[in-house]
Structure formats: structure tokens, C-alpha cells
Amino acid sequence: MPLKFIPVKTIFIFLALMIHAVLFSQVTKIMGTVTDQKSGEPLPFVNIVFKGTNIGVTTGFDGTYAIETSTPGDSLIASFVGFGRQTKPVAKGRFQYINYEMENENFELETVIIKAGENPAEIILRKIIQNKSNNDPDQYDAYQYEAYNKIQIDANNITDKFKERRIFRDFDFIFDNVDTSTVNGKTYLPIFLSESISEVYSKQKPKAYIEIVKANKISGIENESVMQFLGDKFQHINIYDNYISLFQKNFISPIANFGINSYKYYLIDSTFFGDKWCYKIMFKPRQKQTLTFTGHFWVNDTSFAIKEVDMKIMDDANINFINDLVIHKEFDLIDGKYWLLTKDYIIGDLNIVEDEKSDLVGFFGSKTTTYRKFLINQPKEDDFYKAPVSVVVEEKANEKPEAFWNENRHENLTRDEKTIYYMVDTLKQIPRFNTYIDIIEMVTTGYYETGNFELGPYGSLLSFNAVEGARIRLGGRTSNKFSTKLMLFGHVAYGTLDKQWKYGGGFKYMLNKNPRRSFGGEFQYDLEQLGASQNAFREDFFLAFLFRRNPADKLSIVEGYKFYYEHEWFNGFSNTLNLIQRNLYPVGDNVFQFNVKNEDGSNKVVSETAITSTELRLDTRLAYKERFLMGEFERVSLGAKYPILEIRYGYGVPKLAGGDNEYHRLQLNVSHWFNTFNLGWSKWIVEAGRIWGVVPYPLLKLHEGNETYFFDEYSFNMMNYFEFVSDKYLSVYYTHHFDGYFFNRIPLFRKLKWREVAFAKGLVGGLDKKNQDFSVFPQGMYLLDKPYFEAGAGVENIFKILRVDAIWRLSYLDHPNISKFGIRFSLQFLF
């Protein structure tokens, strides 16, 4: 079910309502390039300084620079050893380009003798690495601080033609707030802003972390779940780590222990920061299209702690939708001995097309965090850290008056930031704007909202299968306007071939969202594909029939109900108690057949038109430090740092609600996703199960097959539905995504940014003799008398969204109506 995450609508609509204009700003912003006048080659390491000030920058390896300040001089000076100094006038309070073509100067130097030796920048790098344990704040026994956090989203890259569209007629006042970025010179419109003030507490032994959000202010959003992702811990980057995780990829830190293998370093400057002498080192990657940065850092000459770092990802990095990403960090000496992060800034330019010349609308996303009120190595009592969640939002955190913010902000809001709150509040009062919001939400969620109700999903209004023929389905659910605690949902469907009505419905009630506590119930009388994976292509999707490799003629009618209570004890550990009653009916004139004993000991075959079971099931989920994207009712896992363990134990209760079968069912699933240095990332899934008791084959483990052309990592893609059955089994899946590790070394593939992927999957299992003798198995259903294997290799990131796999079935090749080799497709959106 799509997330009911209404506040995100505000962001989506603004991404469509963009503009292009160049207006004044109170900040002076300058970009430019410095080149050699004779050769035209870019000049790195050139000093660019406002005349009469100490405000300046140094050109990068490509000769470019960018600078912005609210206190500029009236001219800008470029100076470099061996070249004539140049001064150019500055227009204050606006964005401008100032380029320099520098002339070589001839002058004599005294004779010097140069001896081969070690690069001084690399000597300093070794000192940084040797002193990491003293300077990395994550290594301190305990720390606490106050964090002020701002997250801003800006629309960018908009043309005048787009601005003149009719849809902007009623709210063209937003065009008065355009500015230009010094990240890449794009015009932008601020459209979203969040502020938060948090108190953060951390300690090492035992390891514990808690963030208390004291205040939060978000333009257009009143959602506690969102607030947890806008605090200090969101997108936390530690420069001292060997790898910096961005967009689920491992970028090599410029001060990694093995950084010398990935970067070239240049010592270019030294100066005082206060009373601390520091060296400036510039760095760039040794190889093309690697997950690395370019930029510079300042390092103290005695403690070898990082004082300041500016870096950006390489333009040719194999990463999708990111045109630019810049990181800036500032560290200060606290209490005379601790070098701590006091300011953290990150900004990214995101666009579907990674082309600076493209006119396609994109957006900037930026995060600015400042830190103060540090307390080091003074941990609190253990009980203080024992909250059920790691991020706690205080009651009424989003109701703080403006006077509170004026007093407690670490820095004043800029003109652009102040405008965002006013602009969003004004737009929400315009009917046409709200209509556009509804349209955007319908496209992104699959539901159309009308007051207290949402109709959908519209992708299932009409579909086709071999049992029902044309299937017409009408459904919906209550919206968040109806309630943010209670959701009702339901549907009806009709098949033109079987001429039967189907239906379903239910409710969910949220007792608490964090930690999560909820209960609900649902009922259904509808078709279901037994033996399909949890990730299977939805059978009633209107285009599903085009992608099946076999007709959908193995469906069953399922009638029943389910009640559940979900209880999250603390972040990363939860239980769900379920009561599930199901009646399974074969489709058409088919029947279930079983072998039973006569009084004289002989066997006879008995036919049944229904199988009834009533199961009590306890689900346990252990996912240490798992993070979620949460809506009002649903949430999507963003993964965990450690393996995720899921345990399901079910007991089939005889004679309860008509249940005919007594059994015990146990299933264990362990999965993990992890980066593998700079070689891409891997994922593995191990699942084991056991069923005790004599039960009909539909209640046994029907191993997940896949009879579509879509790749499904949770199924066996070359296995048919109902092909294998077990009551004890073990399955293993392993995949590795190389992220272009090999293709990046081939010129043609390097430009395509294709990525390699490979996987293997195996299964072993068995069936007790009693269960073998009890059921009359359908034709084409087999036992696992030896392991089943399949493996594949593929290419992903084709056109950024398409993955193509070649898959080989490696066992049971003598079974009829199977494919030994197949091509499978999937769509995915990965950075």
C-alpha cells in the first residue's frame, strides 16, 4: 500500500512550479574561471581575494572558483606566482561571472637545488591518520551537544518559457524570490524549509545514542514522523571514516587510511586560524569515474586534526540523478583539547538528466547544521539512554512561538529562508494550487483523494487473467482528512468470464506511531496466487497479462479474515500477534484430493472442495538501528546497519472457527545489505522453515516461483508456481552489484554508466512420508530430492531505470514445461 505521506505533496508540486529570472540578492555571489592567457589552460591554486579583506578562495584543479559573502570589497584580486596580478570591479549585492586570463611574468630566481623526496602533503596525511583516534569525535567515551539544523529544498533550472505557462497565473508572486547558486550557476527558487533544535547524547560503553528534538518548524508540514528525519542524525557524515556513505554508496574519504591509493595530494598553502597554524592540502582522484571527491582541507600542524574541509563528488562518478554534491565542514578546538565539528553544510543538485546544459527542472537539497554547548566525556546514567526510540520528539515541539526561534536559533534566517514560510502559507489558500496538489498526489500514490476518501488504486481498475477474463475492480480507503489514527479500506471486483463477485475490506487503528503500536482486521473473498513471493508482480495490475510467460490459471479462491496487534517494544524490535482464518477453494470444477485410511486399513481417495485453517501466529522482527520512512499508517524500511532477523511461529488450531488442521509452523529469515569497500554492494537472504503435522499440500511450503518476465529477487525466477513443495527447507540467495567496477574501465561503457550485477540462489528441502502419503499432488508438483539451483548475471542502470538479467536454471532440467534459460527485466530507481 503506498505511503499516506501527505506533506510530501507540497514538495512535489513545487518541483513543477519553477521559474527562471535573475533578481537582486543581499548577498554578493561570484563564479568564474582563471586561465593562462597564452595557452588557454585552466590555472589551479590561484588566490582569489576581495580587495581590503581576508575573504577569499583558491581555484580548483579545473581553474574554477565560486565565492559568496554579505561583506564584499569593491573589487576582486587574482594572484599567482609567475603571473601578473589582476584586479576586477565587483557589483555588490548580485550574482555575476568574473573570469581572468592571466599573463605570464618573466623574472629571475636565485639558483636552487631540488632533491627527490617524499610529497610533503603525503607526510601530513600519514600524521592525520596516526592521530585519528585522538581527533575523531565518535571515539570519545561520551559527548553531548545542542544542534541547530536547517534543511532547504530549492527548485532550479527553469526557463522563461516555463514561467509563462498558464498554470502559474494565480500565483506568479513566487517568481519574486529567485536567486542564483554558486554551486553551478543555476537560478533557483526556495520552496521548502525545516528548522529543528535538538539535544544529542552519545556514549561508547555500552554504545548508546539519543536525540531529543526540542523544537521543530516545517513549512507546510505538521507530521511528527517527518520531524524525526529532520534532526541532527539525518545524513550524518564523519570525515574521519574510511568510507563516507552517500545515497547508499561508499565514497572514499580523502583522509581514509588507504587514501593515498585513491587520491593525489598537494600542499599549497599555510596560515593561522586564530592562533593555530594550519596547512592547506588539495586533493583529486587518481582514477576516473570512481566514488571519490575533489577539493581541499585545512589541517592543524600540531594535533593534525582537520580544521576545515571543502569537497565535491567527481562529475564523472557513476551515480544517478546527482549533478553536483558539495560538502563543507568546520571544526573548532573546544575546551583547549577537543577538535569538534561546529558547522556542517551539504548541498546537492538533483535532476533526472545529469547535464548542466539541460533545461529540465531539478532541485537543490541542502542541510546546514551548527553545534554548540558541548560536554565531552561526561556520560549520563545508563537509564537515561533507555528510550524505546533513538529520536524523541518532545510534545508540542512544532508549536514553539516565533519569539522562541528568534532567541534560540544559532544563526539568523536569510531573506530567502524567511520568504519560504510566507510563500507556502499563501499558496495553500489558492484553490487552483490545491487542485494541482491533488493531481500530483494521484500520480504518485495511485489514489485519487476526494474529501475523506481516496479512490484506487487506479492501476487495478481493469485487468485480465485466465480465470476471470476481464476483471473490473473498484476500491478505496479513507484519507488522512478522515483520520490520522483510523484507516478503513475495501474493494469489490467482478470477472466477466467466471461471473463471480469478489470483495475485501478492513481497518487499521494506530495507537502510537513511534514506537509503533497498532491493531487491525481485514476480510476477503478473492483470487490469490499461492506460492507467489511477497514481492511478486500484482496479479490485478492492468498490464500484468502482457508480462506473463504462462497463463494465470493456477489461482485459488481465498475466503477468510485476519486480526492482528503490532507492538514495537523499542526501535529495532517488534512483535505482531495474528489470528488468521482461511478457506481455500479450487477454481472451476477442480477439487482437492487426499488419501485416507478405511477401517480395514486400505486407502481411498477423498475429494474436498475447501480447505479450512485457523492459525495463531506470532511474528518477531529484530532489526538493530533500522530506519524507516514513515507515513501516518504505513512505513518503508530504509535498511539497517546490521542483519535483520524475522521469526514466524504459527499454530494451526483445530476446531477453532472451523479449522480442520492442526500443525506447527516455524520460519526464520535473515537478510543483510552492505557495501563492500569500493567494489559495489551485496545482499544476502537466508530462509529456513519447518512444518510439523499432517496437512493438505496448499498448507505446506509452496516454494516461490515466478511465471512472469519480471525479475523478482524473493522468488526462484526459473521455477514454475506449484513446482516444488516441502515441509522442511533451507534457501540461500546472494547477489552482488558491482556498480560499474569493470564497465567504468571500458571507454564506451564508462559513458553509458551501465553497472554489472550477478546472483545465485539455492534451495534444499524435504517432505515427511506422512505428508507425501496424505495429499494427491497436482500434475507438475514435485518433491525436492536434490538441491535446486539457479544463477544469473545482468546489466543494470540502463537508461538509469532498467535492469536486464540472463538467468540459468542449473538443476531439475528434465521437468516438463520449464525454461532452462531466460531473460528477465525489472525497473528500479537507484542512485
Image (spheres, helix red, strand yellow):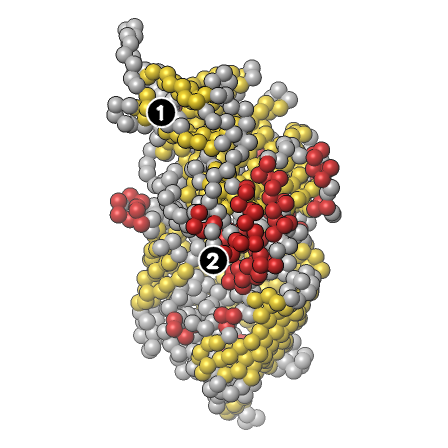
Q: Is residue 646 left or right of residue 322?
A: right
- The residue under the point 47% across, 49% down is 163
Q: CA distance from mark 2 to mark 1?
A: 57 Å
Q: Is residue 102 above or below residue 457?
A: above
Residue 262 appears at what percent x and percent y? 37, 34
| Residues packed near mark 2 inside 10 Å, few (<14), some (14 to 19) or many (20 plus) | some
Residue 826 appears at what percent x and percent y? 40, 62
Q: Quadrant of residue 266?
A: top left
Residue type highlighted by circle 1: Tyr
Q: Nearer the viewer, mark 2 or mark 1?
A: 1
Residue 393 appears at what percent x and percent y? 69, 46
Between 721 and 751, the one lying in front of the other is 751
Disc ID at residue 685: 2
Q: Closer to the N terminus: mark 2 or mark 1?
A: 1
Residue 351, visible in the rendered structure: no
Q: Is residue 265 above or below residue 513?
A: above
- The residue under the point 44% across, 66% down is 715
- The residue under the point 32% across, 67% down is 822
| Residues packed near mark 1 inside 10 Å, few (<14), some (14 to 19) or many (20 plus) | some
